[in-house]
Image: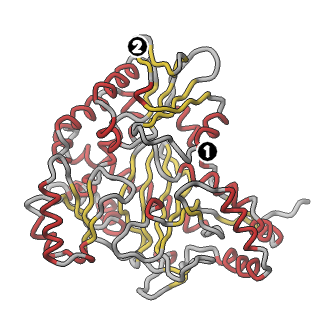
Amino acid sequence: MTAFWPGSAQLVAWEGLDQRAVAGWKQYAATGASEADGAAFVERLHRPGWVHTYPPQILTGEAVTAVETTGLRLAELITGFPERAFGGDRTAWLEYLRLPSTDAELIAEALDHPHLAKVATAFMRPDLVVTENGLKLVELNVAVSLGGLSTCAPYTAAAADSGFARHLAAQGLRLHGTDTSRIWLEVFGSLLRGTGEGPLHVFEAAADPADALGGRRFFADMIRSAGYRISSGLIHDLELSDEGVAFGGERVHAIFTGYTWDETRRFVPPALTRRLMELDAAGKVDFIGSPAAALYDNKANLALLFDPRFTALLTPEERELVRKHVPETRVLDATTLDWALAARPLLVCKPTAAYGGKDIAFGLVHSDAAWETELRRRLARPGEVHVLQRREAPARLTLPGTATAERELVLAPLLFGGRPAGIFVRHAPPRPDSAINASGGAEAAGALTLRRITPLG
């Protein structure tokens, strides 16, 4: 992949961009039509707290394939290697992750149910940062509710309907994006077992009482497009009985959890989760989003790839994959503290179960004393585990139309049922103490490519 990525510490034009689109943008911007087109594009995609990239950043097909292939290989390795490392001993795996006993018990119970175990790794998203040394994995997200699902499909539709797309079409070039919704619905449908008269009723559940599931209009429309009925509300609002689950007096066939494992721990009583798991095991409801995924989502799984007790189990091909794409990762504990203090400028520290770039500490912006204080504070937190990860400097790129000259870029392929389903794109100005995350102000997009239009006749 070296041909697709920058190799210099200087500001560079990223070679993953399709130069036909770059040239087309320069021509379109010169016409003066891009300002109104951009305003209409942003208005169509309006979502509180989000900034969407205009013009669309259009990648080469070769770059898209490289991102998807790398992401899929890494996801398969990280979710599969622990079984090999612990010889199928799930208890040993849970102990390695150092989960509190109440969490470990709930996750283990979920994995004992075949249907919940099948759902656990059906929806994944590896986050790959474009660095000076190629694509580097910063984390693997494993959850049914993934950032990017509600971005890629609407973004593709808005881009295809833009004035810029029509300008490219006049040059014989058509914008193309993966049909993310179709793939998601196919995988979602394969996980459902519900039967009954009429369309299946899907309940989109929130956990936090302050969460009104805002900004998810696209999700509800997508569910309806497949012929399902959908309701939304708090998981606590469901009516549970030996016969199944209901909401507002109507039977619920499937529960989709629009909340994270962190929110599960804070807002959902274990007894409620266990009852839903029991009803799933009895075939009374499809619980799409049980705690089973939390075992695979945990960032400490990356540390297994660098633990000298297990590295000999990697094949030569796997070792090369890790060398190229996974920054060194270790669990923060008494045995790694001295290493973490000595390597301060090179490291970041983050909770193993957090999401959205929350609570990340960057050694580069701390003094030695402040870094030691921060790490010792984290070690003292009861029930929390953190990992240390070597920070590979993101490449500083030039992207067409962006407000600032330098951008840092993360490419996150969506993987549904082991199938690539689009790439969630985020970029932001260089910030040494922040993740490239939409919740932190990064611009979001879905990856697009160009196809040559074949003349009729």
Q: Is residue 153 left or right of residue 291?
A: right
Locate the C terminus and report the quarter of the image it occupies: bottom right
> Is the C-beta separation of discs 2 and 1 under 8 Å?
no
Amino acid at dot 2: Ser
Give how far across and how far down residue 40 sits, in percent.
Answer: 72, 62
Q: Relative to 438, is 114 above or below?
A: above
Comparing 267 with 124, the one in front is 267
Comparing 404 with 23, the one in front is 404
Label 1: which residue? 218
Q: Which mark is residue 449?
A: none
How crowded is the residue under tag 1: few (<14 C-alpha within 10 Å), some, or many (20+)?
Answer: some
Q: Relative to 322, is 295 above or below?
A: above
Q: Is residue 50 left or right of residue 175?
A: left
Residue at horizontal 60 percent and vertical 67 percent from the top: 53
Give how far across and how far down residue 252 sits, in percent.
Answer: 51, 22
Label 2: which residue? 241
Give how far across and how far down residue 258 sits, in percent.
Answer: 46, 40
Amino acid at dot 1: Phe
Residue at horizontal 55 percent and vertical 32 percent from the top: 189
User: Looking at the rendering, which quadrant does residue 433 occupy?
Assistant: bottom left
